[in-house]
Amino acid sequence: MKALIQRYYVVGLFWRQLYRTYRKLRFRHLDLPIVFGNSLPKSGTHLLMQILQGIALIGPFWERGTFVYNRRPRTDARRSPQSIVRDIHALLPGEIACGHVYATPENVSALIRPSIVNYFIYRDPRDVVVSHAFYVTNMAPKHRLHRYYRQVLNSMENALPPASWAPPMKPWNSPISGHALSHILAGSNWTR
């Protein structure tokens, strides 16, 4: 099974690279920008992605599913600034991509260029906290806080205050680096 998944992944990479090359050659005469949709976690990322996918229907832009993360999706470990900037620089003209990219000096210099059109979406922080608590409690059994929210706090009413203002917690000896409010504060520099 593992070999089949590996083979599927390699074939997928091949086809994505082939499509990328085709698009690059097909529209090389056009001076297309990169379209990048940035959002804070739990702030309407899927809505922004749907809006940006509509651009591909009316122009020579293409969306290949690129998503730039600040953290590794499975381990939730922070990614190095160099790896995030490398992902941003790997985007091609005409490509539509999305991400959760915080406003660090490295990210700002990589994204704020004439060749990139940026869209940014965010929500009222109170809504983000409610969405985060609901998501972790009811929809994300593999999230690092799921067990804590379900077993210790055991209700949405109890989960909301820790999601918004509690200091970083470390239940069951697992390092936990923050809460919903830290995501909001980390991304808030984009609005300045």
Image (spheres, grey):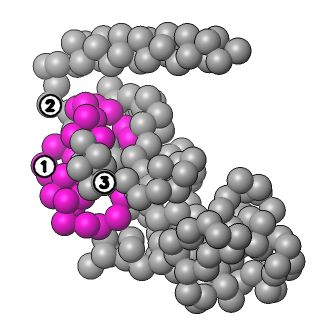
Q: Which label was assigned to residue 114? A: 1
Q: Secondary structure at mark 2?
A: loop
What is the crowding at mark 3: few (fewer than 14 residues within 10 Å), some, or many (at least 20)? few
Q: Nearer the viewer, residue 122 or 137?
A: 137
Q: Earlier in the sequence, mark 1 or mark 2?
A: 2
Question: Residue 71 in magenta?
Answer: no
Q: Position of residue 145 (x, y in %)?
A: 68, 68
Which residue is at a point 19% across and 52% down the rendered structure image? 110
Q: Which residues are magenta?
A: 87-116
Residue type (three-letter) at the residue carrying disc 2: Asp
Q: Is residue 82 visible?
A: yes
Residue at 39% x, 74% y is: 186
Which residue position is annotated with label 3?
80
User: With 66 as the anchor, is 23 left or right in this view?
Assistant: left
**Earlier residue among tags 3 and 1:** 3
Q: Earlier in the sequence, mark 3 or mark 2?
A: 2
Q: Left or right: where does residue 160 sit relative to residue 58?
A: right
From the viewer's perspective, tell me whether residue 99 is left or right of residue 95: right
Is disc 1 placed on a helix, strand or loop?
loop
Query: Which residue: 47% across, 56% down?
Result: 77
- The residue that disc 2 covers is 31
Name the residue type under label 1.
Pro
